[in-house]
Amino acid sequence: MKTFRALSALLCYPTSDLQAAIPAIRDVLSEGLVPSGQEAGLDRLLAEFEHQDLYDLQERYVLLFDRSRTLSLNLFEHIHGESRDRGGAMVDLLETYRAGGFDLVGPELPDHLPVLLEFLSTRPLEDARAILADAGHILVALAERLNRRESSYAPVLAALVAIAQATPLSDEAQALLAEADDDPEDLQALDAVWEEAQVTFGPDPDAGCPVSRDILARIDMPPARPRAAAE
């Protein structure tokens, strides 16, 4: 369903093309997959994309998702960290993509949430729900952490939690929720964390959201520029 593509686009690095596409995203989100209770929260984020300064939107995105490991959109970061198991999980996920006829191109890692959502948009709804449910505990943790920060992105994750029918009561979700949030303003502490955790499974994961061009095209939007070109 196109809803997965629209939610994927909202979790990509903000660009002027994405801002221009918000009316189309709003139309797609009305197709019925997002529970009615989540629509108001998403409207707030959509309005911010339409009316706030692009550089402010970009700064907020970097502060949340690039400078905070506990809010990383690379899903395996939350369960495997930098262990050897993460590499195996990446390979398994790539094989799942390929088996579904989905070719990953660009620098993002296969466990990047916008990439996963783009893949889910190509699958039957029940299959997509089942795959999303496998990451349900991570989505629950991300939604709660964003909610604690009163972030406008929290409703995006809350919508995914609802679609996946994930519960915060599972042992896995409770274990993630028990972890202390890192402080994106404490640059010294964050630098130390990232230096200890430095690992590369593929091209630079900070190079932007390469699927955004395809996402926007597939929901009748103008293509978004990669992050490197936008900065």
Image (cartoon, rainbow, N blue to C red):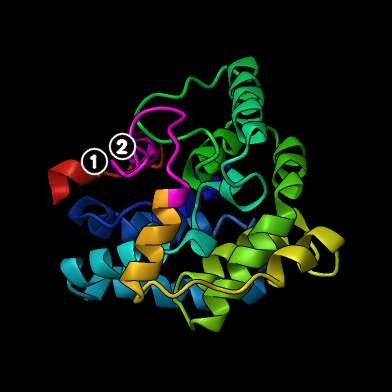
Q: Quadrant of residue 60?
A: bottom left
Q: Earlier in the sequence, mark 1 or mark 2?
A: 2
Q: Work out whether residue 39 can be spotted.
A: no
Q: Position of residue 174 (x, y in %)?
A: 78, 68
Identify the residue shown where x is 53% and y is 22%.
102
Is residue 14 depicted above or below 95 in this figure? below
Identify the residue shown where x is 60% and y is 44%.
76
Is residue 79 depicted above or below 103 in this figure? below
Q: Position of residue 134 (x, y in %)?
A: 75, 45
- Circle 1 sits in a helix, a strand or a loop, which is it? loop
Q: Is residue 212 magenta?
A: yes
Q: Residue 86: which disc?
A: none
Q: Position of residue 230 (x, y in %)?
A: 15, 49
Q: Work out whether residue 6 can be spotted.
A: yes
- Circle 2 sits in a helix, a strand or a loop, which is it? helix
Identify the residue shown where x is 85% and y is 69%.
169
Q: Is residue 205 left or right of residue 163?
A: left
Q: Which residues are magenta?
A: 196-217
Of residues 162 and 171, which is closer to you in this image? 171
Tell me how far mark 1 sits from mark 2, CA to CA.
8 Å
Q: Quadrant of the N terminus?
A: top right
* Circle 1 or circle 2, nearest the eye: 1
Q: Residue 226: which disc?
A: 1
Q: Residue 213: which disc?
A: 2
The amino acid on which the numbered mark 1 sits, given as a three-letter code, is Pro
